[in-house]
């Protein structure tokens, strides 16, 4: 009689989990951003302005990209250009995710979530909904905060290799 080895159901590989986690995290952040933008549009569409000590909340639309660059270009050109950039960014992030430190991984989720949120918002042709105004900086939204903070965290994680336990061999 020969001994048979039981077949084990292997759990998904770590790279697959990291890649899926990055994409799911990004989609959750993009969803939160889009929900808040919808609330801003619903509550500020008649020109309302809410003053707070740090920020003024008012509704604006940005038909360009960062700092309204390219606002005079046709919408299709802006959508296609940002779509190509985001596709390349998401490809790089998902390929790199298994090797990223925890810090870089968190930054990647923030960058991807913000980029996807603004891209989806841009698809209707009206421009990206912006609602946070500081008085000294162009008006921005939560997705912009995700991208900016995420880029800084991603770079910080890349500059500190070996500091995070996940980056050690």
Image (tube, helix red, strand yellow):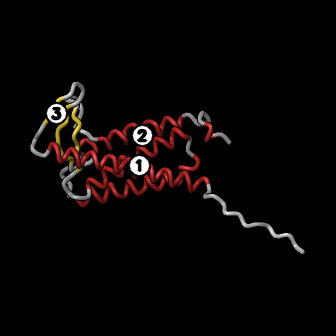
Q: Residue furthest front?
A: 1
Circle 2 crowding by C-alpha within 10 Å: few under 14, some 14–19, many from 20: many
Foreground of the two, 146 or 43: 43
Q: Which of labels 3 and 1 is toward the front?
A: 3
Find disc 3 in the rendering and name its residue: 50
Mark 1 lies on a secondary structure that is helix
* Mark 3 / mark 2, whichever is N-terminal: 3
Cα distance between the residues tagged 3 and 2 = 27 Å
Q: Is residue 137 visible?
A: yes
Give the image quarter of residue 12: bottom right
Q: Residue at x 38, y 54 (%)?
A: 86
Find disc 2 in the rendering and name its residue: 150
Foreground of the two, 25 or 159: 25
Is there a contact, CB below 8 Å, between mark 2 and mark 1?
Answer: yes
Mark number displayed over residue 141: none
Give the number of callouts. 3
Q: Residue 58 at what x, y percent from top left?
A: 17, 38
* Mark 2 / mark 1, whichever is N-terminal: 1
Foreground of the two, 92 or 15: 15
Quadrant where the C terminus sits is top right
Q: Residue 50 at what x, y percent from top left?
A: 16, 33
Q: Which of labels 3 and 2 is toward the front?
A: 3
Is there a contact, CB below 8 Å, between mark 3 and mark 2?
Answer: no
Relative placement, left or right, of 52 versus 96 is: left
């Amino acid at each position: 009689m020969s001994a048979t080895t039981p077949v084990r159901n292997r759990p998904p590989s770590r790279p697959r989990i990291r890649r899926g986690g990055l994409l799911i995290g990004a989609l959750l952040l993009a969803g939160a951003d889009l929900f808040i933008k919808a609330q801003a549009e619903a509550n500020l569409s008649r020109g309302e302005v809410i003053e707070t000590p740090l920020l003024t909340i008012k509704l604006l639309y940005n038909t360009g990209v960062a700092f309204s660059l390219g606002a005079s270009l046709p919408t299709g050109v802006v959508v296609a250009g940002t779509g190509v950039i985001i596709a390349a960014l998401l490809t790089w992030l998902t390929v790199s995710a298994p090797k990223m430190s925890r810090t870089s991984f968190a930054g990647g989720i923030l960058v991807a979530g913000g980029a996807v949120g603004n891209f989806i918002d841009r698809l209707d042709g009206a421009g990206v909904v912006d609602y946070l105004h500081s008085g000294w900086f162009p008006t921005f939204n939560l997705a912009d905060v995700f991208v900016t903070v995420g880029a800084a965290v991603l770079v910080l994680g890349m500059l500190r290799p070996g500091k995070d336990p996940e980056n050690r061999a």
